[in-house]
Amino acid sequence: MSEAITFTKETKQDVISKIQYHFESTHDQEIGELSASFTLDFILKDIAPIIYNQAIEDAHAYVTEKLDDLYELQKHTQR
């Protein structure tokens, strides 16, 4: 994943609000918009690539399994 994830201004503000809500509801700690924005930047830079790569691996495994199924069907119909 070489390009940074970007959001529209509205989406970024929505995500920042969700981060603020998360901290308040789970940690009983209010954080400001700037701290939430830094948290979002951290997630996008350091965590999102890990999730993205896992999703790619999962998709690859799924597609490979389905292609193997098709290959098996083809082998059985060629007899």
Image: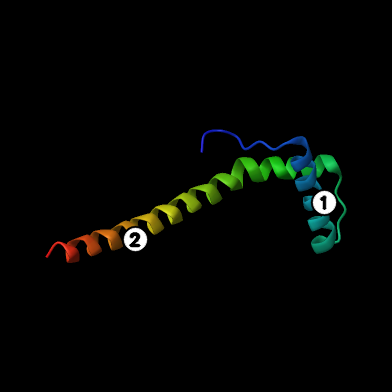
Q: Where is residue 4 in the image (x, y as percent from the top left)?
A: 60, 34
Tag 2: residue type?
Answer: Glu
Toward the top, the furthest residue is 3
Splitting the image into 4 quarters, where does residue 73 fall? bottom left
Instruction: Please give left or right for residue 43 compared with residue 50 in the image.
Output: right
Tag 1: residue type?
Answer: Gln
Q: Distance between the residues labelled 2 and 1?
A: 41 Å
Q: Which numbered mark, 2 or 1, is in the foreground of this view? A: 2
Q: Where is residue 38 in the image (x, y as percent from the top left)?
A: 75, 40
Q: Name the residue under label 1.
A: 20
Instruction: Please give left or right for residue 76 compared with residue 67 in the image.
Output: left
Instruction: Please give left or right for residue 69 compared with residue 44 in the image.
Output: left
Q: Name the residue under label 2.
A: 65
Q: Are marks 2 and 1 in contact (CB under 8 Å)?
A: no
Q: Is residue 8 above or below residue 26?
A: above
Q: In the image shown, does 38 or 75 lie closer to the viewer?
A: 75
Q: Where is residue 64 in the image (x, y as percent from the top left)?
A: 34, 56
Splitting the image into 4 quarters, where does residue 16 fall? top right
Mark 1 crowdedness (10 Å alpha carbons): few <14, some 14-19, many ≥20 = many
Residue positioned 59% across, 46% down in the render: 48
Q: In which quarter of the image is the C terminus?
A: bottom left
Toward the left, the furthest residue is 79
Residue positioned 28% across, 60% down in the render: 70
